[in-house]
Amino acid sequence: MKRKRMVIGLSALVILAVAGTFLWRSGKLPFGAQQAVAGADSTRTGADDPGDVAVPVELAAAGRRAIAAYYRSASTVEADRLVELVTRVGGRVSSLSAEEGDWVAQGAVLAELENEREKVQLRQAELKLEDQRRQLERNRAMMDQKLISDQEFDAVSGAYELAETERDLAGIALEETRLRAPFAGQITQRRVVAGQQVAAGEAMVTLADFSPLRVRVHLPEAVARKVAAGQRVLVTPDTEGADLEAVVERIAPVVDPATSTVRLTLLLQEGGAPVRAGGFVKVRITTDTHTDALAVPKTALVEEGGLRSLFVAEADTVRKVEINAGLYDEEFVEVLDGVEEGAFVVTAGQGGLRHGSRIEALNAAAAGYGGTVVADAAGR
């Protein structure tokens, strides 16, 4: 019995504890939970709404400037003339007179095949010609004295001309065993060695003329229409070095049907930084220029799908406006509408902005921005 009364007492205490907890949390008892929370909230004075915190940004003013549109392409530097010199006859290489990297004059002998037979044949033809020349002189004197007939003199004269022709053919045969430079230039490749047997038409050396150098690029037809002969072009070598200047020398009058492009030949200006033929270069061609364009830094442009917009600063907030962009270069983009000259646009920090967001201009003084600079919660 005693144990039964203890169980009933404990059950009553549990019920009272649960009921008291419920009443305390509902605020129906003095010093309830809601009053405690309210008291805690009342101690926080002057706290900012997290959604109203100023976003740190950088600004720049929209202004007038010259801006140009460029088309970029890549190509290689080409020598004015680059030819493979081939032998006209077969034979064994007797000697080589030039090595890779050597500069040679026009007409210089670069290589020679074994040609003892051709030399003997030429000497034989020269001796025969000399004999026919003496006979012609004797017969001419006799002809003047009327000692021989016209028919006899014509026979001797014809024999002399035939000997002269044979001498010329022997000279050509000897010359064909020698490889000469058709123009002044530099040997870029030697393909044979002394003692090597070569066939007629086989390439022996490669000769290049590097004055001047050219670059050929292919542009879409619509872009090529905006380029004119004589126009200056900027060429940047792939290796470290200063930019080079070139001019548009020729524009092909036809469109390549396979690529729908037009070939432009650029002439590199002499006196610039040294560049090697065959080197890779990047070409920048101006296709349009606006001398008084309203422009903003490219970093201010926000692109979302097909839309382009800017955040324009107004006092301590921003306004998001859609724009139409025109020409652009490496640093600036032309604004056709949506922004007026002198307006300040956000160039850094756009990721945390939306229309109406509060901002803190970090470079207000440097940019010349006269809007309110918002202080942070610490009063700085």
Image (spheres, rainbow, N blue to C red):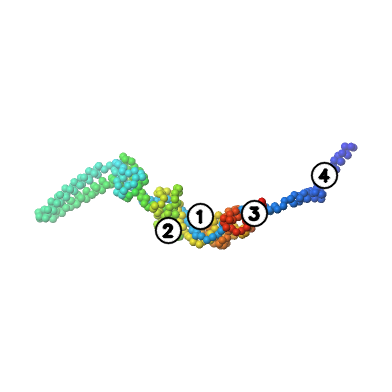
Q: Earlier in the sequence, mark 3 or mark 4?
A: 4
What whole-number distance in Å separates the C-alpha atoms at marks 1 and 4?
A: 75 Å
Q: Position of residue 32 (x, y in %)?
A: 79, 49
Q: Earlier in the sequence, mark 1 or mark 4?
A: 4
Q: Residue visible at 49% across and 61% down? A: 291
Q: Position of residue 247 (x, y in %)?
A: 41, 56
Q: Position of residue 148 (x, y in %)?
A: 11, 54
Q: Which of these two is toward me, 91 or 103?
A: 103
Determine the secondary structure under disc 4: helix
Hey, what amino acid is under mark 3? Ala
Residues marked 3 and 1 touching at CB (< 8 Å): no
Task: Kindly identify which residue carries mark 3.
Answer: 375
Task: Kindly identify which residue carries mark 1.
Answer: 330
What whole-number distance in Å separates the C-alpha atoms at marks 2 and 3?
A: 53 Å
Q: Residue visible at 74% across and 51% down? A: 42
On residue 231, the disc is 2
Q: Which of marks 3 and 1 is in front?
A: 3
Q: Which of marks 2 and 4 is nearer the N terminus?
A: 4
Q: Is residue 13 left or right of residue 148?
A: right
On residue 17, the disc is 4
Q: Which of these two is toward me, 238 or 380?
A: 380
Q: Residue visible at 29% across and 49% down? A: 107
Determine the secondary structure under disc 2: loop
Hey, what amino acid is under mark 4? Ala
What whole-number distance in Å separates the C-alpha atoms at marks 3 and 1?
A: 35 Å
Hey, what amino acid is under mark 1? Glu
Q: Is residue 276 visible?
A: yes
Hey, what amino acid is under mark 2? Gln
